[in-house]
Amino acid sequence: MGDADHIADDGVRAGAVGSPFDNVTVAARLGGETFTTQVGDLVFDCFRVTGGDGDRPTAVLVHGWPQFAACWEDTARALADAGIDVIAYDQRGYSPGARPGEVEDYTVEHLVSDLRALVQEWGLGPFHLVGHDWGGILGWHFAAQHPDELLTFTSVSTAHPTAHGQRIEEDPDQYERMHYLRQIRKDPAGVEARMLADGGRRLAAIYGDAVSPERVQSYVDRFSEPGVLAAALAYYRALGLGHTPQLTPITVPTLYVWGSGDLAFTRGAAELTGEHVEADYRFVEIPGATHWLPEEEPGVVSGAVIDWIRDH
């Protein structure tokens, strides 16, 4: 492998980073706990909030880029208060102990396998899956490949990948919105350097006014640690690599929550998404909301998820 195909990693295994928005602090505020789960050679940082009642349903929350599991704090609180147990984890590349070194280690196939192995380690039966951004991409593939293991699936922001791909080909606006993806694939080291320069100014600007300055700074601080942003960008570089089974029509009850001001997914992609679901389907639009729905609109997101879980 050439240098461009290797992910920098300082090899340090660490949990909390001392931020008011790391898993330890967030879990403490939620009355939950942090823990690690080993899958093969990888160790994932996780937190959970439970009510101690074995009859409570469980929702697994999967974050996207550039975020961490802590983005779900307010959503997790609302779900737990509504009688739903919550588990969230930092995905591979984001967890210090789950940061392999090659681009090929970050394919969608690996992300799906991670979730399936984690759920098995946690001893969960069929569960409710909620994914945002890359967590949504993972979720669409998981729902297609393992429908019997899910009770419901909720995609937050992320259109169905086939619908999104169709609109990229047909709609110049959707194609232009993917400029950042093409830049990452063309010049990953340059993108990383520019995003982290000047104290992470360009990285911070991605969130706009949708995420609080304190939380944005926590994200910038964590992505500034050696190897973290490079691993997160590898998700985009790994697109098309490995073996990813074809996305079949989704047969799991599916909720799609989308903000009309989303910077990545156009209305065309959002509205086309329902054509790929052959099960109970609900589309919730949040007028004026951006891509960062877990932080910007946790009340609407959690309310929609709670209703969806109760309905199924």
Image: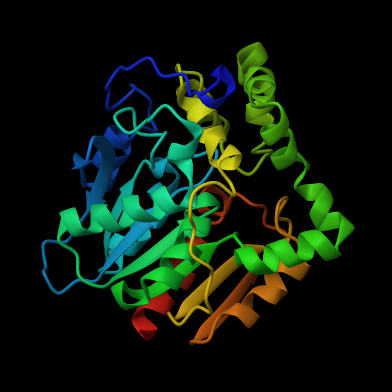
Say above or below: 252 vs 138.
below
Q: Residue at x 25, y 36 (%)?
A: 43
- The image's colour scheme reads rainbow
Task: Classify residue 63 as left or right of residue 260.
Answer: left
Q: Please state the total of marks drawn on the protein image.
A: 0
Task: Classify residue 149 as left or right of residue 54.
Answer: right
Does residue 197 appear in this view?
A: yes
Residue 105 picture location, percent across and down = 43, 38
Image quarter in which the C terminus is found = bottom left
Say above or below: 58 vs 224.
below
Residue 39 found in image quarter: top left
Say above or below: 103 vs 81.
above
Q: Residue at x 66, y 12 (%)?
A: 198
Residue reaching furthest to the front: 1
Q: Which residue is drawn at 38% across and 65% down?
A: 129
Residue 51 found in image quarter: bottom left
Q: Residue at x 33, y 59 (%)?
A: 60
Is 38 in front, or is 290?
38
Does residue 287 appear in this view?
A: no
Residue 40 picture location, percent across and down = 22, 41
Residue 294 picture location, percent across and down = 51, 52
Say above or below: 10 vs 310.
above
Residue 108 picture location, percent across and down = 48, 51
